[in-house]
Image: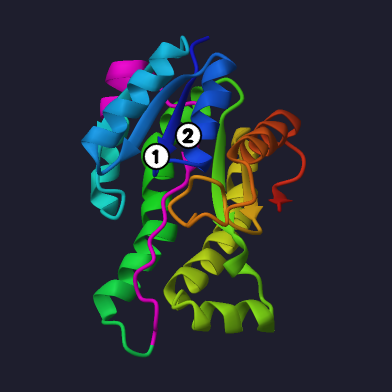
Amino acid sequence: MAKTILVCGYGPGVSTAVAEKFGGEGFAVALVARSAERLDAGAKALAAKGIRAAAFASDLGDPGAAPALVERVGASLGPVTVVHWNAFTSVAGDLLTADAAAIRGAFDIAVTSLVAVVRAALPDLKKGERPAVLVTNGSFAKIDAKVDAMAVEWGAMGLSVACAAKDKLVGLLSAKLAGDGIYVGQVMINGVVKSSAFDTGQGTIDGQAIADTFWSLYEGRADIRAEVG
């Protein structure tokens, strides 16, 4: 049976490695982000590796765009088997000065739009072979005084709260979807990924290690959380 992974929030680093890993395991790969130029380049790079891939420009901050996105992917590559959520935003860095729209935007990317895409893909997932929802998260999600102080210092308060909410969402989705045979798993990254948007030359974590961890979670389907770094 044909398999398609929907990579939401495509860019350098984690999502590129995940696309290559799952593509190499026989998945068709749907790349989603706002930049059509980046998506086209990514699809061509995957095709050069013998991976069937296509680009789907979409604003993942708009939950209302999810049904049309999933429909377009299905028409081009076939039903969605795996959703990989790698989208994030750094808005609302200071929660005491950010406007309400920025704070809502942080949650829309981390929670609202993720739920919207899962809901839109649910009919496909329920019928798919070994369906899954795989979520990238960061260590800002941790309930830890040092992490909180770092998030304030770095101007990442909105991202931190959104990551914590996303961690909770992973557990809720896992409990809700287990009865349908849909696996939900998360990889939490403790550090900076090489070649990612956060890497200013100090990245120490290889995206391939994260992709391999996602694959191990997907194959094992037992633990719902893993950490890298």
Query: Residue 152 at what x, y percent from top left?
Result: 51, 83
Vertical placement of 55 versus 140: above or below?
above
Query: Residue 95 at what x, y percent from top left?
Result: 39, 84
Query: Do tag 2 and tag 1 residues touch (Cβ < 8 Å)?
Result: yes
Q: Which residues are magenta?
A: 71-95
Q: Quadrant of residue 221?
A: top right
The residue that appears at 72% across and 49% down in the rendered structure is: 226
Vertical placement of 165 versus 78: above or below?
below
Q: Which mark is residue 16?
A: 2
Q: Residues within 10 Å of mark 2 (few under 14, many from 20)?
A: many
Describe the element under mark 1 as helix, strand or loop: loop
The residue that appears at 37% across and 90% down in the rendered structure is: 96
Describe the element under mark 2 as helix, strand or loop: helix
**How many marks can you see?**
2
Q: Quadrant of residue 6?
A: top left
Reading the image, the residue beneath label 1 is 10
Lateral position of residue 218 relative to residue 118, left or right: right
The residue that appears at 26% across and 53% down in the rendered structure is: 62
Q: Residues within 10 Å of mark 1 (few under 14, many from 20)?
A: many
Mark 1 is on which residue type? Tyr
Residue 87 highlighted magenta (yes or no): yes
Residue 136 highlighted magenta (yes or no): no
In this view, the residue farthest toward the front is: 201
Query: Residue 9 at what x, y percent from top left?
Result: 39, 44
Mark 2 is on which residue type? Thr
Q: Quadrant of residue 100?
A: bottom left
Q: Which mark is residue 121?
A: none
The residue that appears at 26% across and 27% down in the rendered structure is: 72
Query: Residue 178 at what x, y percent from top left?
Result: 65, 41
Distance CA(mark 2)–CA(mark 1): 7 Å
Q: Does label 2 or label 1 sit earlier along the sequence?
A: 1
